[in-house]
Image (spheres, rainbow, N blue to C red):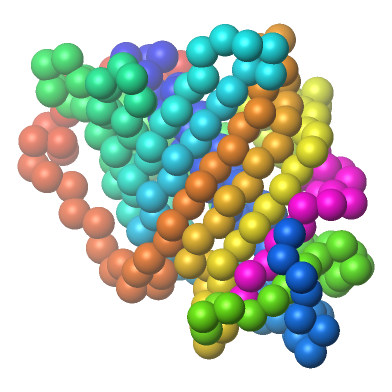
Amino acid sequence: MKKSLKKILFTVLTVFAVFFVVACGNKEDAKINKEEVIKNFSEANNNIKSADLVTTVNMTPKKGGESINVTVTASLIVDPLTLKMTMETKGQNVKINSFIKDDIMYIQNPVDNSWVKQSLPEEVSKQFKHITNNNIDNYELFKDNLDKIDIKEKDGNYLISIVKDTDFLKEAMKKQNSNMGILGQGENFEVNNITMEYVVDKETYLTKSSIVSFETELQGQDIKLSTSSEFSNINNIKEITIPEEVFNAVAIPGN
């Protein structure tokens, strides 16, 4: 179960890092004030307090081998950190339910459906806070690279894409994550060939959906990691209720 806890934390941090850390091919609309859109987009994301999301994380070895496909369905309250999440691994028929509340992580054993609990490591809590409070810096980053960001309007939304000349994202992502070890690489965190596409509500500037991909090395293997996400109920989640049987989970020692 300790390995499952680590896997859960890895997946959660990866998903939310991709969403918050860099939350910012179509022909650009010249009438759009890109700086204004990016400013409003960054401010809206900086004010996200809660959300529901469904994210598919796909990790594919570049030199052949079995891909890992994980679907995460989650409800999140940023502060205090509260999370309800279901993680399913395609092809393995494995579904893992988990909660985080009051600095305690609860996880359900998919074999017998029993629950265990463990104190949330302080460094993990700090990483979440660091991830979700980085959008001010992102605005300055995007403002300085507006020529590399394409924005167009479609169906009442802004389509924001960064699909070329993305070295500035590579360096920013490396700087943001290198000391966090989200992918277990610490200071050796390297990414290449980053692409991002976001659908943003034109009225609220909140993200409706996103597709983000990049290449990196994980456990000595070159992989392509991509995430596809849909967001809803942003800032409308006031409470996440944990069932009684979850509260009665068996405590296990921390790592």
Q: Position of residue 51 (x, y in %)?
A: 40, 62
Q: Position of residue 132 (x, y in %)?
A: 58, 56
In screen coordinates, is 103 left or right of 122? left
Taking the spot 82% from the left edge, 84% from the top edge, the residue there is 30
The quadrant of the picture occupied by the N terminus is top left
- Considering depth in this image, is 113 or 247 the residue closer to the camera? 113
Q: Position of residue 152 (x, y in %)?
A: 69, 76
Q: Is residue 173 magenta?
A: yes
In screen coordinates, is 174 left or right of 114? right
Q: Is residue 38 magenta?
A: no
- Considering depth in this image, is 234 or 252 the residue closer to the camera? 234
Q: Position of residue 104 (x, y in %)?
A: 33, 37
For residue 136, say whether it is visible.
no
**Residue at the front extreme, as displayed:** 27
Question: Which of the 4 quarters of the picture holds residue 192?
Answer: top right
Taking the spot 59% from the left edge, 23% from the top edge, the residue there is 60
Question: Which of the 4 quarters of the picture holds residue 42?
Answer: bottom right
Which span is picked out in magenta? 158-176
